[in-house]
Amino acid sequence: MTAEINLTPKLDAEELSSKSISMWQTTMHRLLRRRSAVAGLIILGVLIFVAITAPWVAPYDPTVSMLDNIPPQKIKARTAPCIHLLGCPKDQPQHFAGIDGNIRDQFSRLLFGARLSLMIGFSTVIFAIIIGTVLGALAGYFGGWIDNLIMRVMDVLLAFPSLLLAIAIVTVLGPGLINALLAIGIVSIPAYARVMRASVLSVREMDFVSATRSLGGNTYEILFKCILPNALTPLIVQGTLGIASAILDAAALSFLGLGAQPPTPEWGSMLGAERNQVFTAPHLVFYPGLAIMLTVLSFNLIGDGLRDALDPRLVHVSS
Amino acid sequence: MKRKFTVLLSLVVLASMLLAACGGGATQAPATEAPAATEAPAATEAPVATEAPIEPTPIPDIPIATFDGTSLSVPAEECNGDYIGAVQSVVATDANTVTFTLCRPDPAFLSKIAFSPFAIYPSEWLEATAGETTRTSEGLEKPIGTGPYMISEWKRGESITMVANPDYAGEQPAAQTLVMRWSTESAARLLELQSGTVDGIDNLGPEDFAVVEADPNLQVANRPALNIFYIGITNTFAPFDNVQVRQALAMGIDRQRIVDTFYPLGSEVASHFTPCAIPNGCTGDAWYDFDVDAAKALLTEAGFPDGFKTKLFYRDVVRGYLPQVSNVAQDIQAQLKTNLNIDAEIVVMESGAFIEASSAGSLDGIYLLGWGADYPHITNFLDYHFGAANPQFGTQSPTYTDLLVQGAQIGVPADAESIYVEANNAIKEFVPMIPVAHGGSGTAYRADVTNPQASPLTNEQFAFSDPGGRDTFVWMQNAEPISMFCADESDGESLRACDQVMEALYGYEVNGTATEPILAESCDPNEDLTVWTCTLKQGIKFHDGSDFDAADVVATFNMGLNIGSPMHVGNSNIWSYYDYLWGLMKKPGN
Amino acid sequence: MMFQYILRRLITSIPVLFGILLVTFALGRLIPGDPCRAILGEKATEEVCSRFIQEKGLDKPILTQFGIYISDMARGNLGESFRLGMPVTRLLIERLPTTFELSLAALIISMIFGVPLGIISAVKHNSWLDVITMIWANVGVSMPVFWLGLMLAYVFSLLLKDTPFWLPPSGRISPGIPDQTFYELWGWVVPETGLWSALLNFTGRLNIFNALITGNWVLLKDSIKHLILPALALGTIPMAIIARMSRSAMLDVLGQDYIRTARAKGLRWSSVIIKHAFRNSLLPVVTVIGLSFGGLLGGAVLTETIFGLSGIGRTLYEAITARDYGIVQVFTLAIAVVFVTINLIVDISYAYLDPRIRLN
């Protein structure tokens, strides 16, 4: 009877991966059919473009005061934006987003801030995903006291409001961008651990896993080749949305002075530094806030779109 | 099976916690306990008995003063011994006369005695509100004084309401009720002023001056800059141990640009460390001019033609001397780079840690700090910072430390001028720090408020301002007072609140720094300024109806200076100002 | 069966509680720097500081400090705030009502607007209403709270000055408004200490509740006016989240076969929604509401700062920067305990609403 069964793990993997490729194709196809997701992708595309080309596109150096510019510009701090196209007299130097408190061009700082925000979002989420999935996989696969221990630690992390815990961690580690990223990463871990664990639990008992196990496949092969691809879907969705909240949290931390340190052009710290000038120099609060909002929005839209595109139930409905 | 194990484990943990709570508590109760007389904790109280601590406790100081109701004194010979305090005795020679005998001449006596923490309390009240280890909540929230207002209610977190004192000895305040509120955000304060819910606000934001000036319903009151913002240099760390490097820094920073860009009207570039309003403050040569070439030449000569790397430390706390902290720091960093090719890495520190490190002289680089006048005398500025005992800048030069000791003994400012000329020049030569600006700040009021106040010592007294005929004056400051028992407070927001209800022997004039007698008719010194005799005004009553007399003055100083007295309790029990300006009456234990 | 489920959940909360204690203690002690100068001002001398450290027990070894910590917590001796010189318990009782009221108001606002909007846009799927709601919801979730708060204050306190729509820009209550607590009014004798005293003090400071039961309409009107702007600012993000969540939950349910069956049977659309769809879509919404409340409770730092409210979020943040150990530990612990409790309640109501879970 054993001779009749021809399935080997290798073959399984091949079938899965060929299925995967076409699954990605259909996913992308369905994603692009949603208008909001397309909008999100466009915004993200612009952001990435800006982040990459900032040094060439930005009209000024983001950390140099206009007084030190060559030629020096005698401008007052916190001047409103001057756009020649919109009527600002030609003899005044053009500054699309105005001047900040240190007589620097805000538009250039906004452009460079895109780099920082994207880097923040991706690095925290990657950090959290790596650690979270390892923990979640261990918890889900082995069960028992390992499961209990890991999940209780996650519960303890989740017992605190995330921003407050991040503030506390950064206060312990000291202010700074790296510490802020670490703090946000730590605070984000439980979500991914739970997702991974849930996936592992649901897949663990499925037939093809038992089959592989009875044929002598070892733990790690099963984890990587069978379970992980299935967990990928919710992880990707969670991750995309996680980037959005990571950028918001980082902005909040920098706003409170605990994240990016001056003179780094990070949107949250730009907003925070000028918060008391909201009525007298609103451009200094409006633009960074708008930038944060658009960035976070794009990831939220893409994440929503991915979730709907990857949802097997909706596949059922539409076909 | 697994679940039972979890349950068991949880119960074990719970049991051990309970055991630790009940069993371990008896031997581990902390040495101090919340006083039982006041706000006892919500559940049962912990036992007060303590066990011997694991580390040796520091040896307590020895109280050496005696107090008998009308006389507070330390033995006269102690003045030459271990006792480092300034006051030898405070004696009520009769019902209306108090004599202060000091161990050393003190030309600044009148300026000091007018300072808020030294306000006079009734002696019976001091006894009645003295708790075990702190003052009772009654004592902390409803102080009894002689001032034009009395405390009606303190809604913690919200506001303090005061009502006019009907028996006030001086002129009745124009507004029957005074309400003090607070907000940490300058934008919120301005909004409240603009919407008319408050009559006056403190600390206008940098851009708000223009807004208030343009608004016909509001007015600005500029606060004179009785402070100094300086760049501290710790000269025990290379390369700042080389005086040429320090001089190069002094010449390589455009201080005018900093003041023009980041400071409000009323601020000025510092020509000396001490503001010119203080006698002898700006005698001697003015500070170096901004000269990049000379600075670069000096740096090259010192061996750093291509600059060097260092750190710039600061704390993100707004003060009158530094209203835009982070912006100024970034500008200094940018200037150092552009002008001198010095790479200064910005390090933002937490306030307490920053003060500790800077005071000890352990910051390896330059740092941003300042100083606001406690009392308007040059010793408050120069002696505190450039005395031989201060490690803040690394090593001090004996040239000026010696001169300062001499100058402090001389009573009349004109007589001491030549000494301070030399001292100021020596400080400029040595460059222990770089004075940058005297920072003005501003208060704003509704246009119909008469006598708008912006005191250089930040002790506005609202009894002297009329809120446009309205019967309530509402003032909004930066933060809530910590307690209303100001004898052991040091923060300006608390002191201002106390200033409305309390009075001292002398006081500062409205919007100025000159002293004028308040509770005393006058305090006259002897020849060598060691004995000051104060004749008190008569017929003054406290808010609770009791009479003000010399015994209250002695009792107040007993409360403040005599560490052995049961009255020597306050809120934090850190008697910063009594200690720093007079010296507590004690000897170090050995 | 319900009881067993509740018991199970309670027991699994115990190690979490211990973990929280450990974390809050560690956080309080690991924060670097010198508490002395932070609290006493920069002019505190060395000598004054060494006495300060001795008085506050900060020189004992860490394990001893932790032992003291646990025994104190268990006995209700929550320590003192160095800066403010008063027991933390009292601070907690004074400040928690502010945050509680604010969070509750924000939650109510977010539910009242969020749930119906979500349901309606799900029912009218892909209509212009749906699109607008979703755009607004997505924007709402992506917006920094702080900016929104200041904008609201600007509009309602400055632009609308001298109109009946004016709202005060900060504080909880205007000075001079009578706010006698109900127990004072009814002449109750309140003990100095104890749980009853704490409870009374707490509820007495809930201005709106207090105003309602004492019939103090002046106070009620004033409190509500002060509460609207911060609650709006704080509630916008949860509102957007709840709208999205209820919409997607509703969409899920509407796509189910049994709904189609109900419609096929000829039931009115509205009763289909209310009787069948709504209740079943409630589950995820309940979770989100529960989690939002916990987040509101702790994360109100920014809102409380702009609007000058002395609630626990802001007090905690100030305590963290001032390294006021007493407050940091207890408030973080309190917030965590509240959060865990709310999760518990949410889980239990989840189980009540969905029999499949408690039978699992």
Image (spheres, coloured by chain):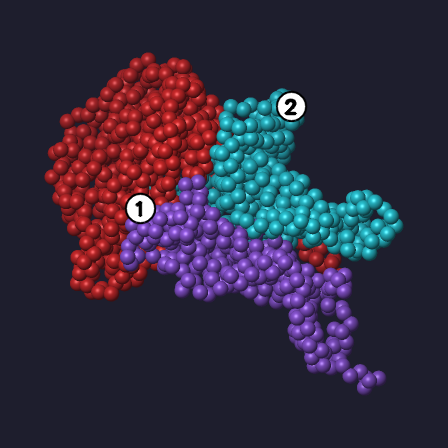
Chain colours: A purple, B red, C cyan
- Picture residue at 21% right of the left edge, 35% below the top: B278
Quarter of the image for the N terminus of chain B: give it: bottom right
Q: Is residue A146 above or below residue A110?
A: below
The image shows residue C350 at horizontal and vertical percentages of 74, 49
Residue under pointer 1: B261
The image shows residue B24 at horizontal and vertical percentages of 57, 47
Left or right: B402 in relation to A263: left
Residue contact between numbered discs 1 and 2, judged by CB atoms under 8 Å: no
- Picture residue at 78% right of the left edge, 46% below the top: C273
Residue under pointer 2: C215
- Picture residue at 42% right of the left edge, 49% below the top: A86
- Picture residue at 44% right of the left edge, 65% below the top: A53
Name the residue type under label 1: Thr
Disc 1: host chain: B
> Do the residues marked 1 and 2 share a common chain?
no
Quarter of the image for the C terminus of chain B: give it: top left
Q: Is residue B464 above or below residue A304?
A: above
Left or right: B489 in relation to B339: right
Q: Residues within 10 Å of mark 2 (few under 14, many from 20)?
A: few
The one nearer the camera, C8 or A220, is: A220
The one nearer the camera, B391 or B305, is: B305
The one nearer the camera, C219 or B366, is: C219
The mark lying in front, picked from 1 and 2, is 1
The one nearer the camera, A283 or A154, is: A283
Rounded to the nearest whole Å, what is the CA distance between mark 1 and mark 2? 55 Å
The image shows residue B148 at horizontal and vertical percentages of 37, 20
User: Residue C195 — which label?
Assistant: none
Mark 2 element type: loop
Mark 1 element type: helix
Q: Residue furthest right?
A: C265
Name the residue type under label 2: Gly
